[in-house]
Amino acid sequence: MAMELPLLLPLSSATLVFGLEWLPLLGGKAERTGLRLARQHKATQMVLAGETAGSVGITAVKTSRSQRKASLYSAAQNLAHLFPTGTVALVLELEQVGYWLVAVHEGAVVARTDRLYRCVEDTEPVLDELRQAYPQFLLLGSHGAPDQPALAAIEAACSTQSRLRVLSRWAPVLPWPVQGFVLVLVLVLLIPKLGTVLASKRQARVPVANVNPVQAWKRAVEQAAHGRVVHGARGTRALLDELYELPIHINGWVLLQTECAAQLSQWRCQARYERRDMQASNSQFLAGSPKHWTVEFISMEQAQPVWDIPGHGAGLLAQQLKTSLQNERDLFSALQAIKPAFSQMQVGKPAPLHVAAPQDDSGQPLPRPPGLAHHLSRPIQLGGPLRSASLLLPYTASMQWNKAVLSLRNIDNPGLKSSSLNLSLQGVLYEIESEPAVGRTVDDPAGVSPVTPPTGLLRP
């Protein structure tokens, strides 16, 4: 059974909301229709991804005073941002909450999804309905479908289009003619007193120091970019070297999976080994494992080592970033050339880095100075054989990785896109624009159209 209340999940850079009610939008005027539907359902927040949106998400969330100041983002709309074409569904386990099921069709969240369930078995009836309604339906993470995006990738997809908009709940008590009469009466009584007050304040006003808008905006950009690092080729190579050196067998124990999560200045890695040899023991595993591992035996048959490695990342503002146009022309062409060596390669649409506008001495927001660079980010997901990851190194200069998963699988017929060691990478590609990038996205960033590979990029 689905849980009724929406879930607010604060994460490192955003607060995601799960469990919105999604209503289809038919015809034009999506903004007007969405607002009308939201008010009809007595919603307090709504999310609408532009005038061409195929659905509107609504909810009634009671937030605390601190939560009202924070921006809320729809997790379902973020997934629609990651998969703008086709029909996909995701069943994602949320720790200590349950399982989140959401479906997206051609970039619009499907009605009666974006639900939370206590047991994964409760999601099966909904998945069966989706399979009947959409013949091309794909369940992310299943055979033949793209890998599941991690929660970090969904968080990284936050943008203005997925931000929940607070709706005004004020409703007039008096008819409009009566309101107009009352307003005129109030103005007649207050205007003389208001003029006196303004005159006295004008005389008592003390000149304040001018604020340099360029310096103020630079500080605001620095604050927004704080904590964002770019791993680049050096950090990506260090991560791959760690995975290359990872032991597959340790005294009768076999590696099942390794997951590394990026932190500010390092990677926190966690592996899972299974006891395959009847003569193998915990002491033998400890004797054969690297000394810097902290090992926990989660059962009689499985061991879970944890360790940290340097991230080798650099600050976002220290990077020489390319523009969206340059990346779409040059970087995407290079990625198209190496795409045959990967089972999955998806690059999302660019979204601006949220920067809180600085204020002048009177508390008013300062206009953004012309020519000040705009930082953008695109979510990126890659999957394929571990050996293919080295082809990616020359093109990672502006990439930040959030998560890396290495899995050991039984493959009967290994090929160019399949191997027993499969690596999945999830992260962000950063870009820069001197002016706001409106409409500067590719039509199909996830499945870049094939081109002839340049000589030497792919080697047999």
Image (tube, grey):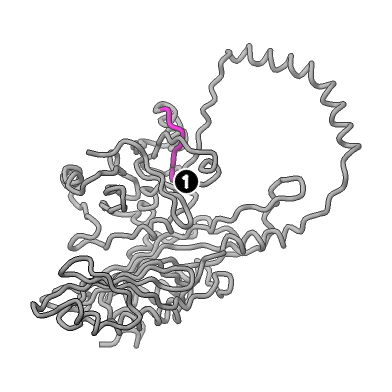
**Farthest residue toward the left?**
278
Residue 449 visible: no
| Number of numbered discs visible in the structure rendering | 1
Residue 207 visible: yes
In the rendered image, residue 354, in percent from the top left (x then y), is placed at 55, 55
Q: In the image, is residue 418 above or below residue 427? A: below
Decide which of 186, 442 is in the foreground and name it. Answer: 186
Indicate the amino acid at tag 1.
Leu
Q: In the image, is residue 343 above or below residue 249? A: above
Which contiguous range is marked in magenta?
42-50
In the rendered image, residue 158, in percent from the top left (x then y), is placed at 45, 54
Q: Is mark 1 on a helix, strand or loop?
A: strand
Residue at x-position 42% and y-position 61%: 442
**Farthest residue toward the front?**
283
Of the 4 image quadrants, the one containing the C terminus is bottom left
Residue at x-position 16% and y-position 68%: 300
Residue at x-position 47% and y-position 46%: 72
Decide which of 39, 301 is in the foreground and name it. Answer: 301
Asked whether residue 43 is drawn in magenta, I would say: yes
Majority secondary structure of magenta residues: loop
Label 1: which residue?
A: 72
Q: In the image, is residue 80 above or below residue 320? A: above
Question: Is 429 left or right of 436, judged from the image as shown?
Answer: left
- Residue count near mark 1 (Cα–Cα under 10 Å), binned few <14, some 14–19, many ≥20: many
In the rendered image, residue 256, in percent from the top left (x then y), is placed at 20, 72
Question: Is 259 left or right of 184, judged from the image as shown?
Answer: left
In the rendered image, residue 399, in percent from the top left (x then y), is placed at 45, 71
Residue at x-position 50% and y-position 70%: 229
Decide which of 266, 92 is in the foreground and name it. Answer: 266
Of the 4 image quadrants, the one containing the N terminus is top left
Q: Quadrant of residue 180?
A: top right
Asked whether residue 205 is drawn in magenta, I would say: no
